[in-house]
Image: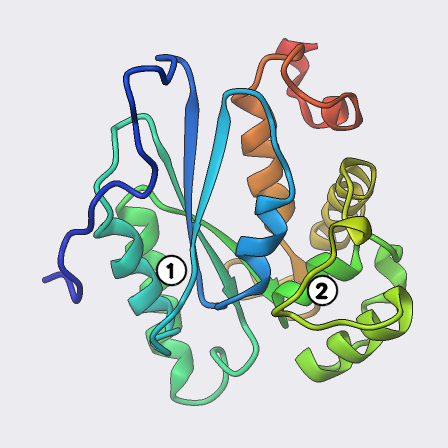
Amino acid sequence: MSLLPRQPRPINRSVVRLRDDRLFIVACDDTYAPKQYFDFFQITRIHVHVIPTVDGTSSASHVLERLVGVEHDEDDELWMLLDTDHCTQGAHLPTFINAIHDAKQRGVQVALSSPCFELWLLLHHLDAVEVTDLKNARAVETKLRQVIGGYNKTKLKREHFHFDEVAKACERAAVLDNGVPGGDIPDSNTSRVYLLWKAIASKALRTQLPTQLHGLLVTSQK
């Protein structure tokens, strides 16, 4: 049974919306950073709508129910962005794993960041080898502050994240993730947000996609 009532559509699908527009509905366990981040980027006829956690219910199961409770069309893509920090420790682990499996059964894609979403932000500026030894979310945020000259997750700055940096982050994250064991529950630092960006790129025409992201296109589109 759903923990939340069905919500209205997150984006107004007016009659002027073209039929081949693509919508990505993304629920996350964070209140601030992911929504601000994706709002920075505009791609023709691609819409990314982020549903943040606003009531403190940030467990993976609550994020999933919040996502599937949103009315959506069959061709919309549903994604969860989840951090592993604290959620994969002790008694929390079985519940977290169950939520991941439940998401897959419902056709929801999952992009984990271990330990946190800020690792993805950091990969916009540092190579993969430079983030592997950061022990926890606090260490990642500290490093991010050092690299970009300050960090407040409630006030991300657009100038720190451009399409150029996104392309680099995707390349670095793919390299990092390729060497991480553990499957659904990674054993070391990684971020799979690059998978969401690859999915976004795959739904765009080459002419619609910023040139910096052409490297994300699948071979058949090149």
At horizontal 25% and vertical 40% (from top left) the residue drawn is 9
Q: Position of residue 90 (x, y in %)?
A: 45, 89
Local secondary structure at mark 2: helix
Task: Please give the residue where the numbered disc 1 appears in the rendered image.
Answer: 100
Task: Please give the residue where the numbered disc 2 appears in the rendered image.
Answer: 119
Rendered-image quadrant of the N terminus:
bottom left
At horizontal 39% and vertical 73% (from top left) the residue drawn is 58
At horizontal 32% and vertical 25% (from top left) the residue drawn is 75
Instruction: Say which quarter of the image contains residue 189.
Output: bottom right
User: Which amino acid, by three-letter code, is at mark 2?
Assistant: Leu
Residue 140 visible at all: yes
> Looking at the image, is 147 positioned above or below residue 111?
below
14 with respect to 208 (left or right): left
Local secondary structure at mark 1: helix
Category of crowding for the residue at label 1, using alpha-carbon neighbours closer than 10 angstroms: few (below 14), some (14–19), many (at least 20) = many
User: Which amino acid, by three-letter code, is at mark 1?
Assistant: Ile
Residue 180 visible at all: no
Instruction: Say which quarter of the image contains residue 36.
Output: bottom right
Rendered-image quadrant of the C terminus:
top right
Q: Position of residue 45 (x, y in %)?
A: 50, 21
213 with respect to 53 (left or right): right
Earlier sequence position, callout 2 versus callout 1 = 1
* Whole-number angstrom distance, CA of label 2 to CA of label 1: 20 Å
> Looking at the image, is 102 positioned above or below residue 74?
below
Category of crowding for the residue at label 2, using alpha-carbon neighbours closer than 10 angstroms: few (below 14), some (14–19), many (at least 20) = many
Of the numbered discs in the image, which one, if any, rests on residue 22?
Answer: none
Q: Position of residue 197 (x, y in %)?
A: 61, 38
